[in-house]
Image (tube, rainbow, N blue to C red):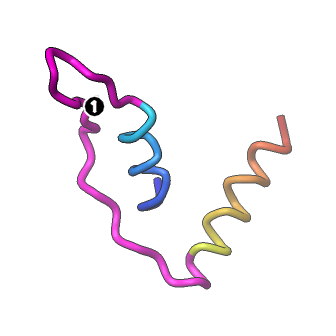
Amino acid sequence: MTYGEYYYHMKYTMSLDNGKWQSKTLSIPIPKRMSKQETIIYYNDKFSQYWKR
């Protein structure tokens, strides 16, 4: 999971509960930001697996 995917999940699960904003926390630590090269490799592998289905 990338840094952006992590925060997208946090924002997507936000809800207002008794006047306070809450979101479901993930059981993984916040991912580090990837370099451009690492990101290209990550998404290439991720989309290759997705398109094989």
Q: Quadrant of the C terminus?
A: top right
Residue at (39, 29) in percent of width and height: 13
Q: Is residue 32 left or right of residue 45?
A: left
Q: Is residue 43 left or right of residue 9?
A: right
Label 1: which residue? 23
Q: Is residue 46 left or right of residue 7?
A: right
SS of the residue at dot 1?
A: loop
Q: Which residues are magenta?
A: 13-38
Residue found at the far top of this picture: 18
Quarter of the image where one finds residue 37 = bottom right
Q: Nearer the viewer, residue 33 or 15?
A: 15
Residue 12 % position (x, y): 45, 34
Callout count: 1
Residue at (46, 46) in percent of width and height: 8
Judge whether residue 7 is colored magenta: no
Amino acid marked by disc 1: Ser
Q: Residues within 10 Å of mark 1 (few under 14, many from 20)?
A: some
Residue at (22, 29) in percent of width and height: 22
Residue 46 % position (x, y): 67, 54
Quarter of the image where one finds residue 45 = bottom right
